[in-house]
Structure formats: C-alpha cells, structure tokens
C-alpha cells in the first residue's frame, strides 16, 4: 500500500468502527460492573488487578535516537500488539498518555499512526479521563500550601531562596521558565518562581511509580519542597505542610489505569506520561502490572532511544516494580540511520549506502545497550516506500553480524498484518527463554559513580564532569538519605552525548552534569546534563495553528 494513498491519522481514526469498551473488557475477563466507564469507549480499571499474580510476558519497545526523519516507535508498539492478537496471542498494549504541550507544540498527536493507533485518538490526545488535570491540581495544591505557609509566618523556617518545588502547567510556555510571584502585603511573599510542564512534575513520576494508594500517599509525603537556611539545611517535605492527604484525594481516580482499544479492537492500557528526557519516560507501574495479570504478552514502550527510555525502564521502573522484561524490540528506519550517518534531511528519500553504512554503528550501539541488561532484542525496521532493497539488505546484514534477528515492519500502512513477522520474532525470543534481566548498577554505589556508570556504559562517554554546584547538591542529597536511589539522567534525546547536534556514534566526549536534585517521592535522583529544559517552548509554527473544530463536531489537525 502506497504511503501517499493512505488517509491522515485523524481521518483513519474517525472512520474506525470502535467496539464498546465493555466488549474490550470482556476479552480480558472483566464484566461491565468491574469497570468504570467514561462514555462508550473509555474506562477506568480496578486498582486491585495490579496486585494479582502476573501471568503475562513483558516486551519492551525502544528505539535508536530520534531524528526529524522519524522512527515510529509508538506506531510499531501498537502494530506489534495488533499483530500478536492476529496470530492468536492475548496481547495487551501499555502506553503513556500524551501531554498537551507536545500535542499543540510539535507532535500534533501521540497515539500511534496510520493503521496502528490507539482509539479514541482525539480523546487520548486531549483531556482523556482527566488524569493530567488531577496531577496538575495535586501539584498546584502543594504549591499553594507552600506559599500559604510562607504568608502565615513560615513556622518551618523555609528559605525562600532554596525552594525547589516549582509550579506546573500542561502547555509549552517559555515565559514561565523564570518569573517573580507575589506582590507582598496581602498578596503573598515576593519570590522567584518557575513552572515545569506536567510530564516533568514529580507528581507525574510518583503516579507512574506508585504501586497502590498507600504507596502513593507515602511517596507524596516524601516530596522535597525546599530546605531551611544555614549550614545544615534541614529538608522540608510535603508531609510537613500537611499536604499529603488532600493531594492523594485529588489523585484517587488518576491512579487507576485507563482501558481503551487499538484500531483493530484489541485492549490498550494508556496511563501516565512522564517525559523521557526529563523524567523516566514510562507508562505507570500499575498499568503494566494490570496488563501482566490479564494478558499473555504485554507490549510496552519507553520514551525516546535506548540511551534514555530503555535505560530508565530497566534501572528505575523494573527495579521499583520487580518487573522481569523478557524481550525487547529496537525500532529504526533506513531514513533515520542515513541521517545518523551524515545524510542531509532533504536527501533521505534517495539511496545512500555510504551514509547508511556510517549510520549502522549507531544501530550497533543501541543493540549493545539493550543486551547489556541481559534482555534479548530484535531489530524492527519500520519500512518506508523509499527504502531500497540494497539498503534494507545492508541493515539486515549488520543485524546478523551483531547476532540479533531483524524484521521488516509495515504496521503504519497495513496495521497488525504488517507486523506479523515481527510478532513471530518476538515470540521466538520469548520461547527461547534466554533473558537474564539485570539492572546496570547497584543503587548502593555513590551517586557520582552511578552517573558515571550510565554515561560510560550507555552513552559511550569517556567520563563525566560535574560542576561545583552539582557536586554540592550530590553531597547534600547523600547527607539526607538519598544516596541509595537510582539516578534519572536528564539530557537531550537527539544524541548519545549531551549535545543535540552530535549524531551517529560520537567518540572522545564527556558528559557535563550541571544540576542534580532529588525527586524523593519518585525515589530517584535527577542529574541534568547539557541544555535541557523542564518547560519547553513553542516553535515558530506550532501544531496548534493547524487544528480546528468543524461545524459537525469533528476535529482536524491531530496526527
């Protein structure tokens, strides 16, 4: 099927005949009174299912570093789940919820593409079941209680220059990166403030890693909002502001996973959405556990390339939840590999074996990244119309030399049918039972050593340079008991380095960590490298400019 002959993503989604969500739930053995319906095509699942024994096998979908050429990791994830069901497996898809910021800023949508989408696509990309609004409200409540505490005398002695808790909004708005709030008098304490986008909120990370309601409340109470002044800097936590109970109330429904469906009517659980280059980039732990309790094979993805998403999935999420991934899919396109090899963006549709050959070492690096965690991997080449036989053979031969299977995948144009070969390769990996999953490092290592381990073993860096202010933060975090947590690296997704312009497989580079802070509620330390923003800005021509509501109530512009 020719790519240009296929309707747009939103047109395909609008033409789809969706199944009632009660029918999708019935496929999982759930009766209508066991789910809470949000209309005809969405539902909240019981939290208790996540506590049931796992019977499913866990498969991670990751990718090479993203480029403007496109890789299609989400599309392949959906297509693989559809393909597994086509060949008789009770497969369940687990994905993150999209953020309104990227939807209206760059992506225009994040629910797969072509004939491999999750539905209802417009709802998922917009307000969905209100989870993001609940997270925003809980985060904002803590912000309000903090400033209220300052206004009423600051009994805890919070140093306003050491407040680490920001405000949040689910929109790309660079004007909120740095601001001054409060007008004094009866209008609040004058102080500097910043906003982060909701996927960068620690409340989002907490929701994604909490195992149940009690764990959620405990984690919320652990949030560091700031510290006192002086040499000892006593940490101030959310529980000391008596915020925990009310925050948990706002999140009681948001904690429950959302059941929707793929374009082919199979079950999909879409829940939580921490950013991959700022937070840990995975859907929620309760969603994955729920799927493992209900399905035979669970397909999940992690944000961006293996250097960010897969590493955090393995070292943070799997460690926190006791998960055992047994296979991985590494997504790439010939176009993106040629760009990694130096081909210009405007020439990617032409055969260029030289650029492709140079880009293949980038693919090799990501294969090795996954393998060092003890998880077997298959390379999925997301096929494009312009790929030549010689180019596809070159990639297949390189994968063979690396000792991993490769599968051509055409799920964008053909849906599940275009992913059956990939599905069989994944099942072969599962049937081989060669997985021996292990995290990359022991959390008992000092924070600096954990950062170095990730930078050198996952990115290929020669070492790490830590700025003096970041070094002082590490010392402080170790002094307050955060020495034995995982590290969540925040860096550009576009390169293995901390410089977005360095594509391919750079050598002879070092990672510079310029900020370190504790996400005590989420249970990890964040190390920021390079120029990474927790509040993105809009481009010159935001995706929002092309969106509109038609007179018949349908929408256009989402993709």
Image (cartoon, helix red, strand yellow):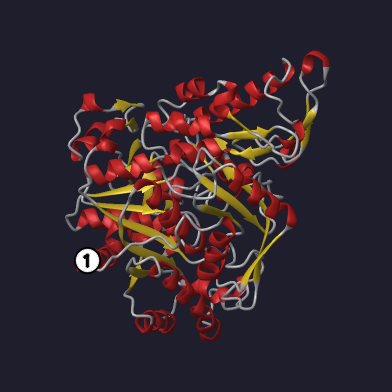
Q: Is residue 528 above or below residue 534?
A: below
Report which residue position mark 1 lands on.
433
Tell me which residue sits at (33%, 60%) in the image.
Answer: 414
Say what secondary structure mark 1 lies in. Answer: loop
Tell me which residue sits at (69%, 37%) in the image.
Answer: 233
Q: Quadrant of the N terminus?
A: bottom left
| Residue 330 found in image quarter | bottom left
Residue 71 position, x and y percent, is 48, 63
* Front one among 6 and 99: 99
Residue 394 position, x and y percent, is 42, 83
| Residue 41 found in image quarter | top left
Residue 299 seen by the camera: yes
* Front one among 235 and 69: 235
Residue 222 position, x and y percent, is 52, 34
* Front one among 132 and 186: 186
Q: Is residue 451 above or below residue 30?
A: below
Q: Is residue 62 above or below residue 241?
A: below
Residue 227 position, x and y percent, is 68, 34
Q: Is residue 397 above or below residue 416?
A: below
User: Which residue ends up furthest to the front in the rendered image?
Assistant: 232
Tell me which residue sits at (60%, 50%) in the image.
Answer: 106
Q: Left of 495 or right of it: where is 332? A: left
């Amino acid at each position: 099927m020719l790519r240009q002959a296929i309707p747009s993503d939103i047109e395909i989604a609008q033409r789809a005949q969706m199944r009632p969500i009660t029918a999708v739930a019935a496929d999982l053995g759930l009766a209508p009174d066991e789910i809470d319906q949000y209309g005809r095509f969405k539902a909240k699942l019981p939290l208790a299912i996540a506590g049931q024994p796992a019977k499913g096998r866990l498969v991670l979908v990751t990718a090479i570093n993203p480029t403007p050429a496109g890789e299609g990791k989400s599309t392949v994830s959906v297509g693989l789940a559809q393909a597994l069901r086509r060949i008789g497996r009770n497969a369940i898809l687990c994905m993150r919820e999209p953020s309104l910021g990227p939807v209206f800023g760059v992506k225009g949508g994040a629910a797969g593409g072509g004939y491999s989408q999750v539905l209802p696509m417009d709802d998922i990309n917009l307000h969905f079941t209100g989870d993001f609004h609940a997270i925003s409200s809980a985060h904002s409540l803590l912000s309000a209680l903090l400033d209220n505490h300052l206004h009423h005398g600051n009994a805890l002695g919070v140093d306003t220059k050491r407040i680490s808790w920001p405000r949040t909004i689910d929109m790309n708005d660079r004007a909120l990166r740095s601001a001054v709030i409060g007008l004094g008098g009866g209008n609040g304490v004058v102080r500097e403030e910043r906003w982060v986008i909701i996927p960068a909120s620690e409340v989002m990370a907490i929701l994604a890693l909490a195992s149940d309601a009690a764990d959620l409340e405990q984690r919320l109470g652990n949030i560091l909002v700031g510290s006192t002044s002086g040499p000892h800097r006593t940490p101030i936590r959310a529980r000391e502001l008596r915020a925990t109970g009310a925050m948990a109330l706002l999140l009681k429904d948001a904690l429950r996973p959302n059941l929707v469906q793929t374009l082919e009517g199979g079950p999909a659980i879409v829940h939580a959405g921490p950013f991959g280059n700022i937070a840990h980039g995975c859907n929620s732990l309760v969603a994955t556990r729920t799927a493992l309790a209900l399905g035979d094979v669970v397909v999940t993805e992690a944000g961006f390339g293996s250097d960010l998403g897969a590493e955090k999935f393995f070292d943070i999420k799997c460690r926190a939840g006791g998960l055992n991934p047994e296979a991985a899919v590494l997504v790439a396109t010939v176009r993106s590999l040629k760009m990694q090899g130096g081909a210009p963006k405007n020439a990617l549709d032409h055969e260029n074996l030289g650029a492709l050959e140079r880009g293949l070492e980038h693919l090799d690096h990501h294969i090795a990244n996954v393998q060092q965690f003890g998880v077997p991997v298959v390379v999925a080449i997301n096929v494009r119309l312009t790929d030549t036989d010689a180019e596809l053979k070159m990639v297949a031969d390189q994968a063979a030399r690396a000792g991993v299977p490769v599968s051509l995948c055409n799920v964008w144009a053909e849906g599940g049918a275009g992913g059956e070969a990939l599905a069989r390769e994944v099942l072969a990996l599962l049937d081989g039972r060669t997985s021996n999953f292990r995290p990359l490092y022991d959390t008992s290592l000092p924070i600096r050593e954990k950062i170095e381990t990730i930078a050198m073993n996952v990115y290929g860096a020669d070492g790490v340079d830590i700025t003096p202010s970041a070094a002082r933060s590490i010392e402080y975090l170790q002094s307050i008991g955060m020495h034995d947590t995982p590290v969540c690296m925040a860096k550009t997704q576009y390169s293995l380095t901390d410089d977005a312009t360095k594509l391919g497989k750079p050598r002879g580079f070092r990672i510079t960590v310029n900020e370190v802070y504790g996400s005590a509620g989420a249970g990890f330390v964040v190390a920021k490298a390079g120029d990474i923003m927790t509040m993105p800005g809009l481009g010159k021509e935001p995706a929002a400019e092309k969106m509109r509501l038609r007179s018949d109530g349908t929408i256009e512009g989402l993709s």
